[in-house]
Amino acid sequence: MTGGPGEHVYQVRSRQERFAGAVFSVVSDEVTMPGGGVATRDYARHVGAVGVVALDDEGRVVLIRQYRHPVGRAIWELPAGLVDVAAEPLPAVALRELAEEVDLTAGRIDLLVDLHTSPGWSNEVIRIFLARDLAEVPAEKRHVRRDEEADLEVVRVGLDQAVAMALAGEVTNAACVAGVLAAARVRDEGFATLRAADAPLLRPTPPPPGQPGR
């Protein structure tokens, strides 16, 4: 939506692509600012991602520990992956990542929460799902993990323990923190506030040059 009465309407005067990759691109926009000035804003345009809070019948959540090169160490995360297959429904992406990363299927999947992971520099949106009724993928059908994923550590911890890990700073991945906190809240509410897995996802992104910001 455009700005209301008295609100500045941000407009992109020009855009220059600085880098283009398979996962994200980096652009520079000249944007009109309140007071009549124009400022340059550099940011990443991301393909988007999904994450999965997989909750078993004993109330345990599946966490993975994976090396992440930008931070130089392994960190606790949820099973997650990129939205990099054209037209693939997001619940299907989530179930695919669950099978590929932790060898699990789910009989039920619901929507937990949507996140802008770092809106100061990226338009990335990650949708977090809650997966239940878990079952093991047969050994002969399991995905062969490569690169950093070949070194994954997979554990199951009680959901309340996962929340405690997040609050203690042991879990710092934004999607994982948000996912376990949201899962604990909906569990305490009897799972009554879950949204449908196929609920529409808004993907706000800076407008093209000449168009007003929303």
Image (cartoon, grey):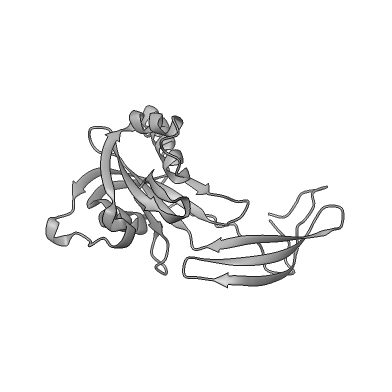
* In this view, 194 is above or below 213: above
* In this view, 195 is above or below 161: below
Q: Is residue 186 left or right of residue 9?
A: left
Residue at the spot x=22%, y=62% of the render? 144
Residue at the spot x=55%, y=57% of the render? 203
* Figure disc tally: 0
Quadrant in which the C terminus is drawn: bottom right
Residue at the spot x=41%, y=60% of the render? 82
Where's residue 149, x and y in %? Answer: 30, 57
Q: Is residue 91 left or right of residue 105?
A: right
Where's residue 7, x and y in %? Answer: 79, 49
Q: Is residue 30 left or right of residue 155?
A: right
The furthest residue to the right: 35
The furthest residue to the front: 72
Viewer-nearest residue: 141 or 133: 141
Viewer-nearest residue: 174 or 206: 174
Where's residue 41, x and y in %? Answer: 70, 60
* In this view, 52 is above or below 214: above
Q: Is residue 104 visible?
A: yes
Residue at the spot x=45%, y=45% of the render? 175
Q: Is residue 197 visible?
A: no
Where's residue 99, x and y in %? Answer: 26, 55
Quadrant in which the N terminus is drawn: bottom right
